[in-house]
Amino acid sequence: MEDYLRIGILSSPHGVKGEISVYPTSDDLNRFSDLELVYLDMKGKMESHKVEGCKYKKNMPVLKLEGFDDRNSIEPLRGVDVYVDKEHAIPLEEGEYFLADIIGFDVISDTDNKKIGVLEDYMENAADQVIFIIKCDDGSTKYVPDVEEFILDVDMDENTVLVHLIEGM
């Protein structure tokens, strides 16, 4: 899945014409307006679907996908992750990175510059804050918020994440 970036999760049918609401996981809500093609993760198999239209309802995108013309046909897609390929991702600014690209990076402690583990995954909490999941070399797992107080540097050349951990993390 490293060639794809998740931009949302299909939420619930909208109306009776095959439209579906999307819970966005992308920083840019407007990015849905320009979509021509999306990929749906159908049990590990990526299926491409043309986007026929997009509108917004209560700050949530509502997509119309080709081939889904009524509520019954779109209903089974509830909870399915929506992706774009990296070629059609929003361009990054200097110093930005895609979260999916740093999975597997070594995590280094700022106190002694030693590796403490590997960035295993990330999740978003209800407040739209990203939490890094670090699988530590000692077998434990640490959850570190992606805020500048704890994530000091991400080095894309060295494949490392420099972190500041506090007691209790």
Image: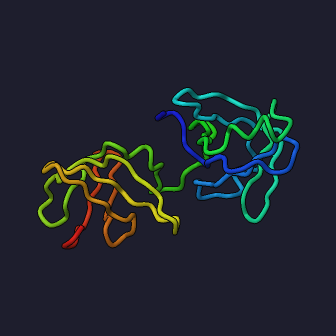
Which image quarter holds the C terminus?
Answer: bottom left
Q: Nearer the viewer, residue 52 or 164?
A: 52
x and y percent of residue 14 in the render? 80, 51
Q: Nearer the viewer, residue 88 or 53?
A: 53
Q: Quadrant of residue 147?
A: bottom left
x and y percent of residue 162 in the render? 26, 59
x and y percent of residue 102 in the render? 38, 46
Q: Nearer the viewer, residue 123 or 89?
A: 123
All told, the count of numbered labels is 0
Q: Is residue 32 left or right of residue 83?
A: right
Q: Is residue 7 left or right of residue 98?
A: right
User: Residue at image x 64%, y 54%?
Assistant: 23
Q: Nearer the viewer, residue 144 or 163?
A: 144
- Please determine whether, in this image, residue 22 is positioned above or below residue 71: below
- Please determine whether, in this image, residue 71 is positioned above or below residue 117: above
Q: Is residue 66 left or right of residue 114?
A: right
User: Residue at image x 32%, y 45%?
Assistant: 157
x and y percent of residue 53 in the render? 83, 44
Q: Is residue 146 left or right of residue 79?
A: left
Q: State the scheme by which the image is colored.
A: rainbow
User: Residue at image x 59%, y 48%?
Assistant: 91
User: Residue at image x 16%, y 49%?
Assistant: 139
From this viewpoint, which residue is outermost toward the front? 72
